[in-house]
Image: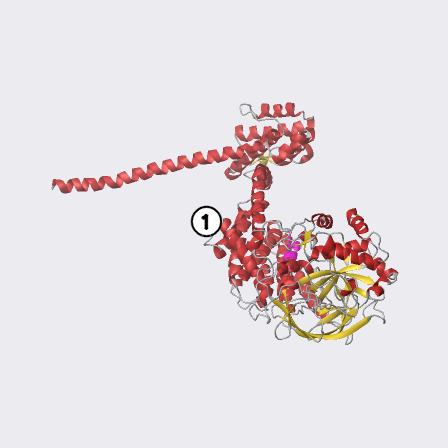
Amino acid sequence: MSGRARLTLCSVAATLMAACALLPLVQQTSWILVAAFLLAVQSAVGAAARRVPLARPLTVLAQALVTLVLLTLVFARQQALAGLIPGPQAFQHFADLLQAGTDDVGRYAIPAPLSDGIRLMMVGGVLVIGLAVDTLAVTYRNAAPAGLPLLALYSVAAGLSDGGAEWLWFLVAGGGYLMLLLAEGRERLSQWGRVFGGGPRDPGRQPGPVAPVRTGRRIGAAALGVALAVPLLPLPAIDGGLLGGTGSGVGSGTGGGGTISAVNPLVSLRDSLNVDEDRTVLTLRTNSGDLSDLYLRIVSLDDFDGTTWKPSQRDVVAVPDDLPTPPGLGADVRRAEITTRVAAADWYAQDWLPMPYPPSGVQVSGRWRYEPVGMTVVGDHRQTTRGKTYEVKSLQVRPTAEQLASAPAARGSLRGEYTELPDTLPAVVSQRAREITEGSSNDYERAVKLQEWFAVTGGFAYDTEVKVGTGRDAIARFLRDKQGFCVHFSFAMAAMARTLGIPARVAVGFAPGSTQSDGSVAVSLKDAHAWPELYFEGVGWTRFEPTPTRGSTPAYTLPDTPGNAVPDLPQASRSADAAPSAAPSASTSCTSEEKRVQGCVSALPLDEAEQGGGGPPWYKIAGWAVLGLASLVVLLLPMLWRLRRRSVRLASAQHTGSAAVRRAAPGPRGREVGQPTVGGSAVLLDVPSEEVTEAAVAHVLAVWRELTDTAWDYGIPPDEALTPRRAAARIVRLGELDETVAASVHRVAGAVEQVLFAPQPRAEAGLPEEVRRVRVALRARAGRRTRLRAVVAPRSAIRAVWDLSDRWTTVKATWSVRTARLATLTQRVRRPRRRAADAGAGS
């Protein structure tokens, strides 16, 4: 087996070994057999393309197209043209399957049933990774970077799996990667011959690269052992970070530290507000006599970059039995402790624990951590709220307007952190904030005026499907167009408060739900909400409600309202069913149909990666990308053909020249007749062997054709009527070549005359180097435009069309000859039959 074939098999095996980590995620394992078969076909296409040989980009393109056809055959055969060619309906079917698979991933626990959507995601993912591994390791001969896609495949599986056998799948995936590296190393070492070879084990057996391969195996086994053993040692841990714990980035769960990373929880908030079918998320029972202020807070967003708000990276600790008093809350502020029991739906998987703010105690089972700055509880190691029932004790803080108005300035560190603004914030934000709050004597009055402007007097309209725009001017556009939903109002008010020097952040969670007939409170998807929190020294973080028709206006912001009597304000949130649904939830994300009609579009960017807003579906983007790639390949076909033709001509000529030198050793059938030429690199050899003579003639002519085509690419068209010697003189004259380069041109021309007209043609080595020297000289004297055209659109590429025309002529001639022979044979067969018939008639 050749080295490249062995490397191809190892790339397939390594991909499948890494894909084994996905097996625990689903109930059925039949998908991996389909993936293995399709992966084998994909690799076989690559091996055939490399053997032709095709250029490397064309090899990858051929594999990608075959992969698309294979996926169409397996998953979208009925929607494809002729069952194989994917069209618009097939791409739409793929989009629907991927959407269904995404919904199933969020709906089912591990191991999930093998639905068509999940099956497509797994098989397609393995094929994509396999194509990347084959491209890097085999096509481009660099196996080391192929570990990155293998690591990505294993990491996805390890991140979703909640079992305890991750080390086993790591061992399998790591073994496949080492096998791939060893296969590549063995092939590279074998090219060095006996330099690295050990002694032969058997008499007469050629030594090979045994010792280095054996050493590589030992090193690989030791590396795997260290990788598996080190995590078991009691070494200092690096807790938390992006890879720690759950997808939210929580630490290790030992109770001794860790961090929570800046993950934006608003990604699904807009989708929750736009769902057609409202679903109950949480069911509450509380001893509070007033539900208008029972907001369930999930997390606070305090990092503002001018485009969006997100939580800062914070340290997390074990959840204490009694939570500390919230920062800034003075002893003279009236408060009451309430108890709320929360039951989460069995489909609602939230990393953060929704709780009334500020919490004073929480009882919940599972792995949870506490973030002291935001006073939030977050899941550790993939812990979520799915089906959880927990109890929260919290404070109902009831400050008076006088207490808020007389609050002193916040302390320096807190004020500096929560009033920080980026330089890219449009000036209109601070300008409008100053205009609205003009004449205010304290921060409380400024905050109330901002709230009133957004909710009442500013002329804003609440709309969850508004399209305001994206980018760093999004807040300015929202202030101009005055349409949006809670995200826009809370973002804008918090940013304007910071421009006024008021510490501000944004809270995300649920507005008060709807009271049911049994006394419970149902909180639904459409109760998802965001609101600003402003800090006042002596009171702490205080809720404001700038969003019109949503939630309830805080009593301490209403005029002539005592602080100890909270009015019963009407609820603006829509109610849901009393009991949580036992059936699996439909995805809270937009469906593919809604995305097509742009029914679910964010108005402000919630994440840097989402600044494109509600763009076209992915399959349209993929289709245009494929079309653009195909157009680019078509435009670059002349360049690719020319590069390939040059490589074949010069490489084959170099090989033939070397072979002629080796076969021309002194002996009875060959003798050395020439002397070294310039540089001592060229020797004329008498090689009377018929095989070498034919090869020498063909490849010397190929080198001459490459020389004339190179001159043609740089503006010197060939003249077929001239002899090689006169054609060489013409190239030297028109190309204005110096004596050294001219000697190279004439040497190639002389070699052509020798193989064409000499009684005994001789092979001459070193001709490819002469052609390369001429090409460098022509390129040096040409202008920039000529050099660019010689590479991108070479004139000699027209020979590809001529070659196709000649081949078509040959095919037609061959077909005509075969047709004539078939007709003659048919006539010969018919004649005896006629004679027999005539004989029968005569008798």
Against 719, is 5 above or below? below
Q: Nearer the viewer, residue 503 or 795?
A: 503
Look at the image and tell me whether residue 162 can be seen.
no
Look at the image and tell me whether residue 529 can be seen.
yes
Estimate the x, y position of residue 651 in percent, counting from the top left: 59, 40
Against 16, is 666 above or below? above
Q: In the rendered image, which quarter is residue 787 located in?
A: top right
Q: Nearer the viewer, residue 636 or 605?
A: 605
Q: Nearer the viewer, residue 197 or 711?
A: 711
At a point 56% along the width and 71% down the height, the residue shown is 582
Q: In the rendered image, which quarter is residue 410 located in?
A: bottom right
Magenta includes 145?
yes
* Kind of residue at badge 1: Leu
- 268 left or right of 812? right
Q: In the rendered image, which quarter is residue 453 located in?
A: bottom right
- 540 left or right of 9? right
Give the residues in magenta.
Answer: 142-150
Neighbor class of circle 1 (other Cα within 10 Å; few <14, some 14-19, many 20+) is some
Estimate the x, y position of residue 614 in percent, counting from the top left: 62, 51
Disc 1 element: loop
How did the renderer colour the structure?
secondary structure
Estimate the x, y position of residue 195 in percent, counting from the top left: 67, 53
What residue is shown with label 1? Answer: 81
Magenta includes 693?
no
